[in-house]
Image: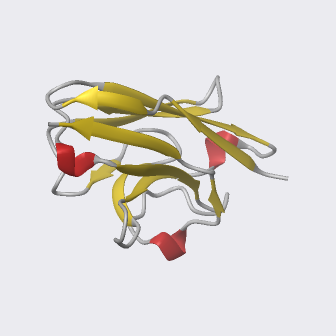
Amino acid sequence: QVQLVESGGGLVQAGGSLRLSCAVSGRTFSSSAMGWFRQAPGKEREFVAAISRGGDSTRYADAVKGRFTISRDNSKNTVYLQMNSLKPEDTAVYYCAARNWLHGAPAVLITEYNYWGQGTQVTVSS
């Protein structure tokens, strides 16, 4: 059974930084592309960033380009999201997601991901 567990969320002032982690168990982590999504209160879940199985290809939402960096450590079965220059509009629950092992390319659509974590809250105060 695949499990994804996010950590690293919290409360931070605008302009600050946080690093989210997502530990994956129960599958061959290095075979799967991974992604981060977020959902703010009253809004749809949206794409944030994604990374290929080998870590050599990444994609970002326009709203976070230049501020967020996705990375992975296949030896630790963990994917990260480094968030810098945080803004109040970044406040949301952040979810980690994994694609099926057949798909190694980063993807932006929610429907392209098969496994999800429980989410971690990020709150940015102004």
Q: Quadrant of residue 45?
A: bottom left
Give coordinates of residue 20: x percent, y percent: 45, 32
- Reply above or below: 81 against 46: above
Q: How many marks?
A: 0
- Can residue 102 be seen here? The reply is yes
In depth, the one of 16 and 62 nearer the eye is 16
In depth, the one of 11 and 104 nearer the eye is 11
Give coordinates of residue 123: x percent, y percent: 33, 40
Give coordinates of residue 84: x percent, y percent: 22, 29
Q: Residue at x 19, y 44 (%)?
A: 88
Q: Residue at x 64, y 23 (%)?
A: 75
Q: Residue at x 74, y 47 (%)?
A: 3
- Can residue 64 be seen here? The reply is no
- Reply above or below: 62 against 83: below
In depth, the one of 23 and 33 nearer the eye is 23
- Reply above or below: 47 against 87: below
In depth, the one of 17 and 35 nearer the eye is 17
Give coordinates of residue 55: x percent, y percent: 44, 38
Residue lying at the far front of the rendered structure: 126
Instruction: Give the colouring mode of the picture.
Output: secondary structure
Q: Residue at x 20, y 35 (%)?
A: 86
- Reply above or below: 21 against 59: above
Residue 114 falls left or right of residue 69: right
Q: Quadrant of residue 113?
A: bottom right
Residue 52 falls left or right of residue 68: right
Image quadrant in which the C terminus is located: top left
